[in-house]
């Protein structure tokens, strides 16, 4: 099973859609299960409208999940129960260092140009000593007791990765308000959902050793990880709105067909080891291989996307095109005979890069009055609409 983890703090962006696609392709190719988990434990930033938008975007792209959506917030009791069990078995401990104390120590380390490390002041306190401080009303966080040695894993994209545990702090698994942290709860949910593969962006690489340490502390099986290269803009900086539209729905509104978007996203980091660039979904499932995903960051090229979109427009059947047109613009060619609409598309479809292009070009054929500007849209050699 592979799972897609999405935090509902905004619209589904291009990077999230690419991650969803690679998870979906891997699951389908290996006859696995593709699961969707909404990580909504940050109630201040998580909004229902974004949860709905994420679901809508994935459905539009044609990437359905195989079971009910899992909402991380519904597992809070389970998460807190595991924190308590770790305190009981000594794999975690209460830390009473305050934010002010840590800030002072961090500043002192900076002044000395030394690497800041969180002191393990309370690591070896007995349960009784910890409880005594709790009874005094002292606030605390819960930290994982990181063992000596190294943490090592084989990433399906980056290969073998090894981290010295001495380079990691005893990190917080539950905040002072009792809420468990991200790196902790994802391991619990992965185990409970029987996740075997986690495919995500390489911005999570630093989190992986921490999560593996939690898996090991709890005696859980560690899933296989694959970290995908970052998507950059043309200036080699992280993709953002200054480069292009980053919201998946914006591409739907611009008239791109979902298969064109998926085709282009598949090529952002994945090398099919051939000159082939145009794929349908079945072709992507057959050809996809995580071992062919490159470490090098992918560059988003809107001109290439537009070219791929044009190829899909040309290859799409007339019936499919009409369905997509009417989804985008329900009043397109209202009142026109089906045979006439098909004749119009036979003349105009291959000249269009997107559905929006096609709507603009085809308008001429459905208008009772044709202006000079409208006539300029009709390419030389096409049949005049009145001759159809």
Image (spheres, rainbow, N blue to C red):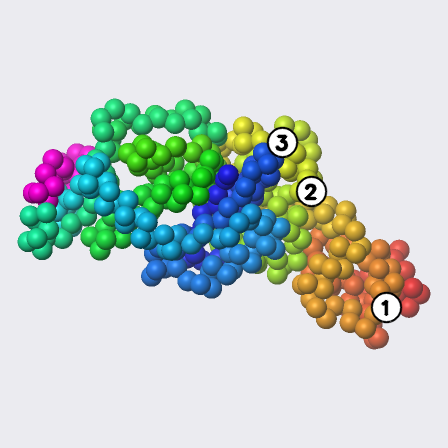
Percent from the top left, x then y, of residue 318?
Answer: 80, 55
| Membership of 125 in magenta stretch | yes
- Name which residue lies at 8% across and 53% down: 135
- Residue 35 visible: yes
Q: Which residue is mark 1?
A: 337
Q: Quadrant of residue 206?
A: top left
The answer to whether the residue labelled 3 contacts the one labelled 2, judged by CB atoms less than 8 Å apart, is: no
Numbered range of the magenta stretch: 106-130
Provide the major secondary structure of the magenta segment: loop
Q: Nearer the viewer, residue 63 or 134?
A: 134
Residue 118 in the figure: left or right of residue 384:
left
Dot 3 surroundings within 10 Å: few (below 14), some, or many (20 or more)? some
Mark 3 or mark 2, which is nearer to you?
2
* Residue at image mark 2: 280
Residue to which mark 3 is pinned: 272
**On residue 105, which mark appears?**
none
Q: Is residue 26 above or below residue 350?
A: above
Q: Residue at x 45, y 39 (%)?
A: 195
- Looking at the figure, which quarter contains the C terminus? bottom right
Residue 348, how many percent across, how many down?
81, 57
Residue located 42% across and 54% down the image: 71
Mark 3 element type: loop
Please state the horizontal and vertical placement of residue 153, each as a whole percent of the image.
39, 27
Real-space Cα distance between discs 1 and 2? Answer: 30 Å
Please tell me whether mark 1 sits on a helix, a strand or a loop.
loop
Where residue 12 sits: x, y (%)? 50, 54
Lateral position of residue 233 relative to residue 100, left or right = right
Residue at 51%, 60% in the rendered image: 53
Give the quadrant of residue 263: top right
Query: Quick check: marks 1 and 2 in contact, CB under 8 Å?
Result: no
187 left or right of 373 in image:
left
Q: Is tag 1's residue or tag 2's residue first in the polypeptide sequence?
A: 2
């Amino acid at each position: 099973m592979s799972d897609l983890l999405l935090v509902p703090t905004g619209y589904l962006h291009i990077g999230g859609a690419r991650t969803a696609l690679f998870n979906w392709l891997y699951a389908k190719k290996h006859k696995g299960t593709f699961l969707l988990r909404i990580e909504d434990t940050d109630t201040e930033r998580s909004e229902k409208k974004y949860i709905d938008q994420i679901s809508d975007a994935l459905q539009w792209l044609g990437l359905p999940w195989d079971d009910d959506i899992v909402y991380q917030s519904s597992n809070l009791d389970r998460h807190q129960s595991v924190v308590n069990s770790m305190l009981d078995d000594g794999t975690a401990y209460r830390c009473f260092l305050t934010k002010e104390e840590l800030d002072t120590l961090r500043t002192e380390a900076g002044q000395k140009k030394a690497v800041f490390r969180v002191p393990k002041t309370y690591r070896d306190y007995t349960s009784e000593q910890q409880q005594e401080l709790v009874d005094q009303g002292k606030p605390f966080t819960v930290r994982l007791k990181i063992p000596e040695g190294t943490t090592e894993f084989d990433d399906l994209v980056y290969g073998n990765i090894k981290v010295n545990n001495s380079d990691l702090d005893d990190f917080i698994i539950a905040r002072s308000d009792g809420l468990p942290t991200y790196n902790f709860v994802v391991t619990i949910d992965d185990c409970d959902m029987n996740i075997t593969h986690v495919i995500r962006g390489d911005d999570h690489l630093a989190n992986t050793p921490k999560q593996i340490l939690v898996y090991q502390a709890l005696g859980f099986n560690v899933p296989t990880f694959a970290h995908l290269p970052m998507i950059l803009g043309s200036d080699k900086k992280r993709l953002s709105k200054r480069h292009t539209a980053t919201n998946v729905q914006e591409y739907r509104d611009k008239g791109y067909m979902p298969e064109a978007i998926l085709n282009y996203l598949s090529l952002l980091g994945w090398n099919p080891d051939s000159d082939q660039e145009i794929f349908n979904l079945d072709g992507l499932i057959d050809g996809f291989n995580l071992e062919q995903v490159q470490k090098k960051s992918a560059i988003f090229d809107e001109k290439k996307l537009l070219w791929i979109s044009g190829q899909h427009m040309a290859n799409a059947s007339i019936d499919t095109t009409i369905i997509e047109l009417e989804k985008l613009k329900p009043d397109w060619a209202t009142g026109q005979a089906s045979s006439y609409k098909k004749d119009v598309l036979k003349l105009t479809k291959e000249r269009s890069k997107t559905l929006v292009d096609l709507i603009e070009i085809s308008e001429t054929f459905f208008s009772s009055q044709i202006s000079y500007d409208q006539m300029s849209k009709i390419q030389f050699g096409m049949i005049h609409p009145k001759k159809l």
